[in-house]
């Protein structure tokens, strides 16, 4: 004899209540509307256009700034007072190359929808962000050190020190923007792939 719909609903609700005591309901499910598909019921799940925009912006901005560093490396080192070693331009070029490469990787990952590749991108993005932060701290620290000798330096050197400080601040701002973009991509990865895998697993268990 087939089971009635009322009995199935009652048993399923009891099962959800009993499971609710063992594991708390995630905040993400609290904002889901009943009956909605888990990929389209909230704005967080629909971050795919934003992820693509972030990826193309990383490639574009990284390529433009890397071109400027390659063409004006000497002036950039003069601004940071590292003409002989050229350490600042080399480190900045390496970071910008990493940003561009990470952007290309994100474009490929977003278009192919590869979960493992997305996880690799997130690890690469963390290392790139740490590189940007280290570079920003080094620039700001070097610029602040040069301001200690402000009464002794000439007007032109003072202007170069100001530019070096502004360069460090912009690098720090870039690190903040990159971290925000990382959070957006991480949210997309979590709700598009991780939650999908969990829900599919729950459906198979039922």
Image (cartoon, grey):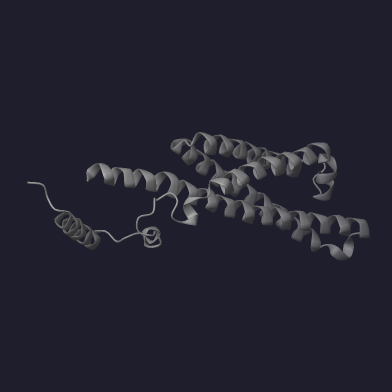
**Residue placed at 43% from the left, 55% from the top?**
41
What is the x, y in percent for residue 115?
44, 38
* Residue 127: quadrant of the picture: top right
> Can I make out residue 89 in this image?
yes
* Quarter-of-image position of residue 35: bottom left
Q: Nearer the viewer, residue 76 or 51?
A: 51
Q: Quadrant of residue 103?
A: top right
Question: Who is closer to the viewer here, 162 or 150?
Answer: 162
Most extreme residue toward the bottom is 151
Q: Where is residue 168 in the image (x, y as percent from the top left)?
A: 73, 55
Of residues 14 and 93, the one drawn nearer to the viewer in this rendering: 14
Residue 198, how many percent across, how many down? 33, 46
Residue 162: x and y, percent? 82, 59
Seen in the picture, residue 40 relative to 144 is either above or below; the reply is above
Specify the farthest residue to the right. 155
- Pick the front one: 103 or 68: 103
Q: Is residue 27 above or below residue 185?
A: below
Q: In this view, does 129 lie above or below 10?
A: above
Residue pictured at 79% horizontal, 54% vertical: 164
Q: Please report the residue visible at 26 percent of the width from the left and 58 percent of the height from the top.
A: 23
């Amino acid at each position: 004899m087939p089971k009635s719909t009322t009995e199935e609903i009652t048993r399923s609700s009891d099962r959800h209540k009993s499971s609710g005591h063992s594991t708390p309901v995630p905040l993400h499910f609290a904002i889901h509307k009943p009956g909605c598909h888990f990929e389209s019921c909230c704005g967080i799940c629909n971050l795919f256009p934003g992820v693509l925009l972030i990826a193309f912006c990383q490639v574009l901005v990284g390529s433009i700034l890397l071109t400027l560093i390659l063409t004006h490396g000497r002036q950039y080192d003069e601004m940071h007072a590292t003409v002989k070693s050229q350490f600042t331009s080399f480190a900045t070029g390496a970071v910008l190359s990493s940003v561009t490469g990470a952007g290309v990787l994100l474009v490929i990952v977003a278009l192919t929808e590869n979960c493992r590749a997305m996880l690799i991108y997130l690890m690469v993005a963390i290392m790139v962000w740490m590189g940007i932060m280290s570079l920003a701290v080094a620039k700001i620290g070097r610029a602040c050190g040069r301001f200690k000798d402000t009464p002794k330096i000439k007007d032109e050197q003072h202007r170069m020190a100001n530019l070096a400080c502004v360069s460090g601040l912009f690098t720090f701002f870039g690190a903040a923007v990159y971290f925000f973009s990382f959070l957006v991509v991480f949210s997309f990865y979590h709700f598009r792939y991780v939650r999908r895998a969990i829900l599919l697993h729950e459906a198979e268990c039922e």
